[in-house]
Image (cartoon, rainbow, N blue to C red):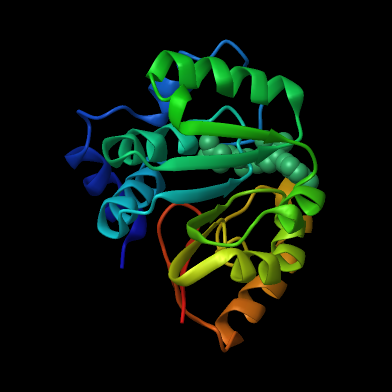
Amino acid sequence: MALEKINTYIAGLYTDITTRTQYMNETELKEFVPVVDDDVARLLKMLLYLTRARRVLEIGTSIGYSTTSMAQVVKEYDGRIITVEFDEQVAGQARRNFEQAGVSDFVEVLMGDALKIVPQLEEGFDFIFLDVDKRLYAPLLAECVRLLKKGGLLVAEDTLFPVIDLDQKWHHLIAPIEEFNHLVSKHEGLASTVLPIGDGVTVAVKK
Ligand SMILES: C[S@@+](CC[C@H](N)C(=O)[O-])C[C@H]1O[C@@H](n2cnc3c(N)ncnc32)[C@H](O)[C@@H]1O
């Protein structure tokens, strides 16, 4: 399949909703780790509408584009998102963005290292979005499975790093993603697949 042509066509169908470019342009801070592509944001929204997930955990906030996209859905049925970030500067910008988007009441930012915070959370999440340093994916997998309810979804971003045309500066993250992909695909407690959207998105349901 001619993936680029397909992606351009799909993007052309959705030009009337807020795009990541718009969101980033309206953000004062200009230095931050990349945020999800628009098609990934649409997938997150769709999965939330589908599952009506009320307790959502996001690991990796940055300036809050994916959080805002998800919060716009969960606010419709009074769900809540906990999002974890260790960089004060991007978290500050994310909070301002939540305020501007009218979703602050539905989002709680937990500041600190995800490796320390996530193991302290109580189980019972309906939905987890994993989009942190790729080297943490494998170490956090068991915790994500513990935190999810049965039937809950784990969505992980950038899982096609091993096969996409990736900037040299991210090559050190290929091996950690390979490890995560191997663990997820073989995990007996999860039914999963990898979707070729954005830089690859793993969707896994806890059996
Ligand atoms: C790819 S960005 C998240 C993008 C965001 N989900 C979006 O699409 O709008 C990853 C974020 O994880 C944060 N991060 C990296 N390592 C972390 C850690 N150990 N604990 C908490 N946050 C971390 C980075 O500061 C960065 O802002």
Q: Quadrant of the N terminus?
A: bottom left
Q: Nearer the viewer, residue 86 or 74?
A: 74
Position above or below: 136 against 149: above
Query: Where is residue 179 drawn, in percent x and y?
Result: 72, 74
For the point 33% across and 46% down, which residue is it?
Answer: 45
Q: Nearer the viewer, residue 92 or 125?
A: 125
Ligand number 1: quarter of image: top right
For the point 70% across and 55% down, which residue is it?
Answer: 134
Position above or below: 171 against 14: below
Specify whether 178 is left or right of 198: right
Q: Nearer the viewer, residue 24 or 191?
A: 191
Q: Nearer the viewer, residue 1 or 96?
A: 96
Query: Where is residue 54 drawn, in percent x and y?
Result: 40, 50
Specify whether 190 is left or right of 146: left
**Could you say which quadrant of the image residue 68 lies in?**
top left
**Could you say which quadrant of the image residue 113 lies in?**
top right
For the point 61% across and 74% down, which residue is it?
Answer: 181
For the point 33% across and 34% down, which residue is it?
Answer: 75
Position above or below: 41 against 195: above
Can residue 31 be seen here? no
